[in-house]
Image (cartoon, helix red, strand yellow):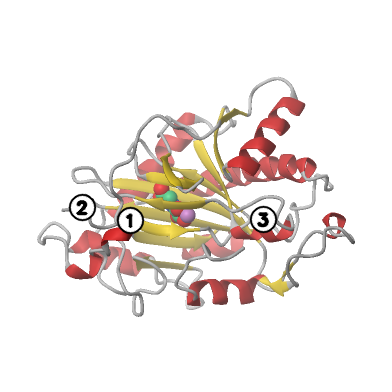
Amino acid sequence: MEHLVSSWCNDRSLPESYILPPEDRPGMLPLGKNIPVVDLGAHGQTDILQQILEASQEFGMFQVINHGVPSNLIDEAMGVFKEFHALSAEDKAIETSKDPDKSCYMYTSSHNYATEKFHFWRDGLLHHCNPLEKYIQFWPEKPPKYREVVAIYTAELRKVGFRILEFIAQGLGLNPDHFSSELGENQILLVNHYPPCPDPSLTLGLCKHRDPVVINILLQSDVYGLQVFKDEEWIGVEPIPYAFVVTLGALIQIISNGKLKGAEHRVVTNSNLARTTASFSLNPFYETLIEPAKALVDASNPALCKSFSYKDFIIKYRADASYGTAFE
Ligand code: OGA
Ligand code: NI
């Protein structure tokens, strides 16, 4: 495993390999704009559907509140995520190398650490979640409550994810359960950690990307850092206590035949606060074919791309230095 940022960042100034060219540096953000917030507990399913559809079309990203996940569970989950990243580098390596098939692992910067031109100020713990009986044996056992808390947390987020996908399917005019089997049952948790950074103006936690997923449900903690790119400008995503940030991924763009777009987003760092976030994504199985939904294709709306397996998509995504942003 490459050296995690958290294992050396306290002793060093920003290494050159993290300094981005001027045009890619974050700069200052004008404040004032916000992404939509959808109240999932509101009365009126039609209103919720309409709000989700509009936010998905306009931003590809929105926040949800009153989603039904108890706040004490969110606190406990964030607690074990932070405790995990506070372990020694040695413990983290031990706790994430139990599966020879690598359903649980750690990495730093991006999956392309060895070949990328610049590094990003982020450590990540990634593991598969479903089926739980298959994967939980490979999850960290430190902190001691990790498995117990994260099993409950990911089961709750699965429900939120499918509920939102039902709304999106209906909004697209598809069967409400269009995403509910193969397209969303491969669930992955990515716990990001961005230590305090010596110079946030020169680097990024994550560069501009589209998530290689169907949909992502992010717990972003109370520290600001996420930005979404819309109409050629960056908009900051305000942390709202106990809300989730829902991001449409590159795969929904394909399945909706371009009716919806995966949001382009990035993460800025912070000079005095560490930031821990958890991305829970719904994905297809590796062999599942991804293609524009048949109901959305006809003579006047030809398929914008051919079908391909999720596995091929991931291989191509990781090999491509544009992280899905050149992808239309
Ligand atoms: C991601 C991501 C945002 C964040 O994990 O793909 O965009 O704020 N995370 O950590
Ligand atoms: Ni992302």
Residue found farthest to the top: 43
Circle 1: residue type: Gly
| One can see residue 90 in this view | yes
Residue appearing at x 69%, y 29% in the figure: 48
Q: Nearer the viewer, residue 312 or 161?
A: 312
Residue at which label 1 appears: 205
Tag shown at residue 197: 2
Give the x, y percent position of residue 289: 74, 70
| Helix, strand or loop for disc 3 | helix
Q: Is mark 2 within 8 Å of ligand 1?
A: no
Give the x, y percent position of residue 193: 33, 53
Circle 3: residue type: Ile
The residue carrying pointer 3 sits among few (fewer than 14), some (14 to 19) or many (20 or more) residues within 10 Å by Cα, namely many
- Tell me the CA gap for discs 2 and 1: 9 Å
Circle 2: residue type: Cys
Q: In which quarter of the image is residue 118?
A: bottom left
Give the x, y percent position of residue 26: 31, 51
